[in-house]
Image (spheres, grey):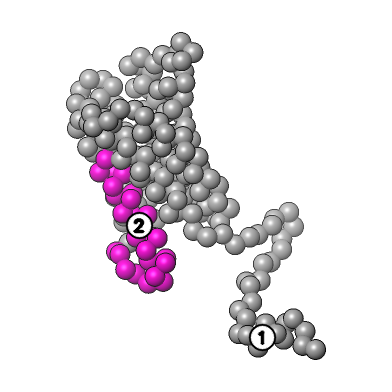
Amino acid sequence: MAILAEVRKESHYVPEPVITAEPGIYKEWWANPAVVGLMGFATTTMATGLHNVGYWGAGPTLAMAIAFGGTAQFVAGVVDLRKGSLFGGSAFMAYGAFWWSLVVLDYLLPKTGISSGPNELLGYFLMWSLFTLSFFVASFKVGNHLAGLFGLLLLAFLLLDGVTLGKVPAIVAGWEIFITGLVAWYIATAILVNGVYGRKVLPHS
């Protein structure tokens, strides 16, 4: 009777990758989480932009911020860090936490009587501007499309700083935020399509 290994060999069985064990470290194979992470960021950002231009209320943004932009993107970041991606994992986890914090700041805290005035909002967006600046500088080593995305994202936070100060119209910031989300959507789509087809269908760098 043929043993299992022989049966697999006869049926052109492709063996699983060998996982090297290291003391205190358990390695697993994970799929690329960038599609979920970028899509969560993209769609929530576009929803936010449409809210800022007055297309709809805060409902879609809050819902997306909790479920997709927040939770799903954070989980994608955990997976990406496990895969060894410092840039992607850190970005997904941090901006996932950003969307959660936005829900807390705009919705939950006011329910408890804690409201945020212009100074608090300016400080909040300024902190995220500085955080995004760090990733913008690092993004040039990662890829041209991501460098463009983080450049647009940095501009978005700077415009939100201006909106808070009363120097920039909300509609201007809103459309720029929407475009930022659209760029993230394209990058996610390129990763998805190219990965599924196994070749470069959409330009991506």
Three-letter amino acid code of the residue under disc 1: Lys
Q: CA distance from mark 1 to mark 2?
A: 37 Å
Span shown in magenta: 178-203
| Left/right of residue 39 with respect to residue 161 in the rendered view | right
Identify which residue is drawn at 39% across, 16% down. 116
Identify which residue is drawn at 35% across, 14% down. 117
The local crowd at label 1, few if under 14, some if 14 to 19, many if 20 or more residues have their Cα within 10 Å, is few
Q: Is residue 191 magenta?
A: yes
Label 1 or label 2, whichever comes before in sequence order: 1
Residue holding disc 1? 9
For the residue labelled by badge 2, is the local secondary structure a helix, a strand or a loop?
Answer: helix
Q: Is residue 21 visible?
A: yes
| Left/right of residue 19 with respect to residue 127 in the rendered view | right
- The secondary structure making up most of the magenta span is helix
Q: Residue furthest front?
A: 1
The local crowd at label 2, few if under 14, some if 14 to 19, many if 20 or more residues have their Cα within 10 Å, is some
Disc number placed over residue 189 in the picture, else none = 2
Q: Quadrant of the N terminus?
A: bottom right
Question: Where residue 27 sits: x, y (%)?
Answer: 65, 59
Three-letter amino acid code of the residue under disc 2: Thr
Identify which residue is drawn at 41% across, 71% down. 198
Q: Is residue 90 visible?
A: no
Q: Splitting the image into 4 quarters, where does residue 2 fall?
A: bottom right
For the residue labelled by badge 1, is the local secondary structure a helix, a strand or a loop?
Answer: helix
Q: Is residue 65 magenta?
A: no
Pick the residue in front: 173 or 137: 173
Q: Quadrant of the C terminus?
A: bottom left
Q: Splitting the image into 4 quarters, where does residue 163 fall?
A: top left
| Left/right of residue 53 with respect to residue 35 in the rendered view | left
